[in-house]
Amino acid sequence: MTIGGARLSRRALLGAGAAFGALAVLSPTRTGQARAPAPFVPTKTLTLKSGDAELKLLGPDKPATRILAYDGTPFQTLRLPRGTRLQATYVNGLDEGSSLHFHGIRMPNEYDGVPPLTQPLVEPGGRFVHLLPLDDPGTFFFHPHCDETGQAGRGLVGVLIVEDERDPKFDADEILCLKDWRLAENGGFLPLTEPDGASKAGTFGATRTVNGKPTVELSAAPGADVRLRVLNVDATRIMDIGVEGAEAWLIAVDGHALKPVRLDDLPDGIWRMGPAQRIDLHVRMPADGKRVSVGDYRAADIYHFATLVPSGKPKRKPRRGPLALPAAELPFPDLEAAEFHSFTLQQATDEAVKNLGLPPDDPLAKALVASFCVGAATYWSIGQTSWAAGDRLGLPPPLAAMKEGRSYRIEIKNETRFPHPIHLHGHAFAVLGSSKGRLPRHFADTVLVQPGEAVEIGFVAVSGDWVFHCHILEHMETGMMGWFRVV
Ligand code: C2O
Ligand code: CU
């Protein structure tokens, strides 16, 4: 493979050898072998293997669906304490290339899981070892970073909870993982992407689930304090999360604590979440023993996905006011000194395959497109560039060259007719404001930018090559992805 191939193998070499090589020159051991450069001592070691699993998504009497999952467990969930040094080995049990990305985790760039930028593709049967310092508590998730529409679309998503011993004590702590599925009547998958969806709002699933079921029922005592971790892991859908029948506060966004905001005090009483976004809610069960409903209010046809059923003895001393999480310990950008950049989200039309000068059904064209983890068409751009577009199929130039430790303010302007949840790897950024003025200041790793809106974020740059992309999976795979090089 010549197109991009040289670059790929050079990167692979650099990734695996550079640090060791440099150190070996400085301090060769007696055997001539280099010593490990960084004192990362794992406190938890585990393996995540992608492969098949079965789930009855259409109903108990209908055929099951062969989905994808880690370790055969739909929405495989890890709960680990803050401060864990995690050594996670990804084993690719799929019959196509893949990788593993821990979304929202701040980590050394080489473990970010983005082929071909930070590592080579993990081939079927291959593995990749990630060394992750889990210093930020909160609600995170993980997923592949290649053919995401096909792999995450078929369910290959896991949940990572980093627990904080300093958190206030809740009576219950529940995960609500939301994902739709595109199913045929025989339980198989409908095409996960269609040009009409990919070039517009995305290709939606009609079977909605929470934790792989149509709805969930949880029980809690009247007056109990319940923490709900709500994750939108869908490929496409934007959701308006609201709670009926109880006092509820937004206490964290994308894992990071914020000063609790009463849901009723937010515009329309909801928090709008695009794919990849997460929130933590504190719900206080009413004392009168009524049921509480949690739902997506975006469509007229409300999806009440969770019901909290009062049960057991009422709590003796119900508390008052919200239970705030410890403040997020994240670098806040120096806004005065920050360098400003503006990037526009637009529609684009050139086709990746066309750039190869090969017919789209040529097997070589298909293989090359697959090796770059992109779709065969380009419909979108970010900052006037599209991923894997240009005069050859290769990485576009970085959107910006940044300096490690410097503060940046980034404006994201949406000139399209569709909302885009924009995600930056390797950082937790501050959402500074929006031209529509609807957002409280908070830390996040993904921010939803509405049509015609400009949102400003700020962060202190961390060294590495970090992708910046829309998390509507078909959008990222058809061009809406760029990257920052921080040195
Ligand atoms: Cu959730 Cu680039 O990823
Ligand atoms: Cu998008």
Image: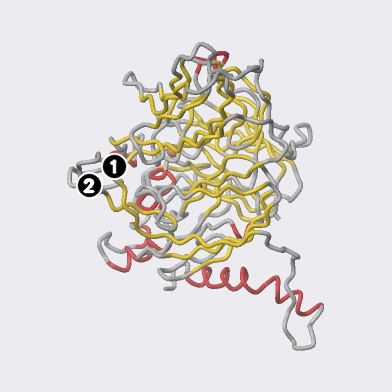
Q: Amino acid at mark 1?
A: Leu
Q: Quadrant of residue 168?
A: top right
Seen in the picture, residue 362 relative to 382 is either above or below; the reply is below
User: Which residue does the numbered mark 2 point to in the structure image?
Assistant: 187
Q: Position of residue 399 (x, y in %)?
A: 58, 48
Residue occupying image coordinates x 74% and y 51%: 404
**Which residue is the extreme one toward the top?**
288
Would you call the spot at circle 2 few (<14 residues within 10 Å), some (14-19), or many (20 or more)?
A: some
- Left/right of residue 428 with respect to residue 63 in the rendered view: right
Seen in the picture, residue 86 relative to 340 is either above or below; the reply is below
User: Which residue does the numbered mark 1 point to in the structure image?
Assistant: 57
* Image quarter in which the N terminus is found: bottom left
Query: Is residue 392 something one can see in this rendering?
Result: no
**Which residue is the extreme one toward the bottom?**
31
Element on which disc 1 rests: loop
Q: Quadrant of residue 40?
A: bottom right
Could you say which is closer to the camera, residue 24 or residue 57? 57
Could you say which is closer to the camera, residue 12 or residue 230? 230
Seen in the picture, residue 421 relative to 154 is either above or below; the reply is above
Q: Position of residue 63 (x, y in %)?
A: 21, 47
Q: Amino acid at mark 2?
A: Gly
Could you say which is closer to the camera, residue 390 or residue 257? 257
Query: Is residue 440 something one can see in this rendering?
Result: yes
